[in-house]
Image (cartoon, rainbow, N blue to C red):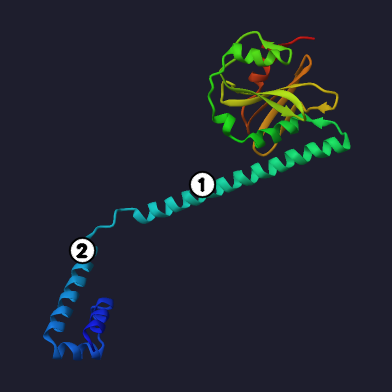
């Protein structure tokens, strides 16, 4: 066994029992010393590793971390699938309505819109004041008599090609989405509606439909009452 082959064999297995290794060290003291040094190094490494205490509960924490990572990954996938499905339903619903000339249930449309917009508007805080809200409402012939709570977001959106207003407001028990939609003949709505994730209420004030959407089980009646009391539309 030449020197290069001997070293490769010992590096791969310091405790090699190959007869060719034993024969090589018997006839060469330098090989014998090299083998001894490598075996000692391997022994020291194993001893060092065994002396390192494993933190208590490490296995449990690793399993928990992996489970949380899988849960987050699954939630992201679910949200993506829901958003994709809602977007498809949103677009398909519009097309079906247009081609069939059927009344549009804007309560269901509001749910599709909520999914379609995702969580971005809900996470924003533009600290919109009453004057800014009323400037947008004025374009639709409406105004608020006074503040009815913090407004995080206010922007125009589209309900079947009808320019509408999308608000994110503080309901007193969490954020809610409020849609203000000019009423059209082709629109219909349900006073109460829901799906597996959201609850909603819809009502009309003057010539506008007001739709409030919140998380499942969220109290929406107070927001509805405040809007009915403070929101006014010209005839």
Residue 134: quarter of image: top right
**Residue at the spot x=75%, y=30% of the render?**
107
Q: Is residue 171 above or below residue 93?
A: above
The x and y percentages for residue 61 are 38, 51
Residue 173: quarter of image: top right
User: Is residue 158 visible in this depiction of the protein?
Assistant: yes
Q: Which quadrant holds the N terminus?
A: bottom left
Which disc is residue 72 wearing? Answer: 1
Q: Mark 1 falls on what kind of element?
A: helix
Q: Which residue is mark 2?
A: 48
The x and y percentages for residue 69 are 47, 50
Residue 192: quarter of image: top right
In the displayed orientation, state which residue is furthest to the left: 29
Which disc is residue 153 wearing? Answer: none
The x and y percentages for residue 124 are 54, 27
* Residue closer to the observer: 218 or 46: 46
**Residue at the spot x=13%, y=80% of the render?**
33
Q: Is residue 44 left or right of residue 124?
A: left
Q: Is residue 78 above or below residue 142?
A: below
Sequence-wise, the earlier of marks 2 and 1 is 2
* Residue closer to the observer: 168 or 96: 96
**Residue at the spot x=74%, y=41% of the render?**
89
Q: Residues within 10 Å of mark 1 (few under 14, many from 20)?
A: few
Q: Is residue 150 above or below residue 74?
A: above
């Amino acid at each position: 066994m030449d020197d290069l082959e001997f070293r490769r064999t010992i590096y791969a297995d310091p405790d090699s029992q190959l007869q060719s290794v034993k024969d090589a060290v018997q006839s060469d003291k330098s090989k014998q010393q090299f083998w001894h040094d490598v075996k000692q190094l391997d022994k020291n490494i194993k001893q060092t590793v065994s002396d390192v205490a494993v933190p208590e509960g490490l296995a449990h924490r690793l399993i928990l971390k992996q489970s949380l990572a899988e849960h987050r990954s699954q939630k992201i996938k679910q949200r993506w699938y829901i958003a994709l499905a809602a977007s498809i339903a949103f677009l398909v619903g519009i097309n079906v309505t247009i081609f069939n000339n059927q009344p549009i249930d804007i309560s269901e449309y509001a749910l599709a819109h909520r999914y379609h917009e995702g969580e971005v508007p809900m996470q924003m805080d533009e600290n919109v004041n009453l004057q800014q809200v009323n400037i947008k409402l004025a374009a639709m012939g409406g105004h608020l008599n006074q503040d009815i709570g913090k407004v995080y977001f206010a922007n125009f959106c589209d309900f079947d090609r009808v320019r509408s207003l999308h608000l994110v407001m503080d309901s007193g028990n969490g954020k809610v989405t409020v849609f203000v939609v000019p009423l059209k003949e082709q629109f219909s709505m349900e006073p109460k509606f829901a799906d597996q994730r959201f609850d909603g209420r819809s009502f009309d004030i003057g010539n506008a439909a007001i739709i409030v959407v919140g998380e499942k089980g969220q109290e929406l009646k107070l927001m509805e009452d405040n809007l009915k009391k403070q929101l006014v539309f010209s005839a």
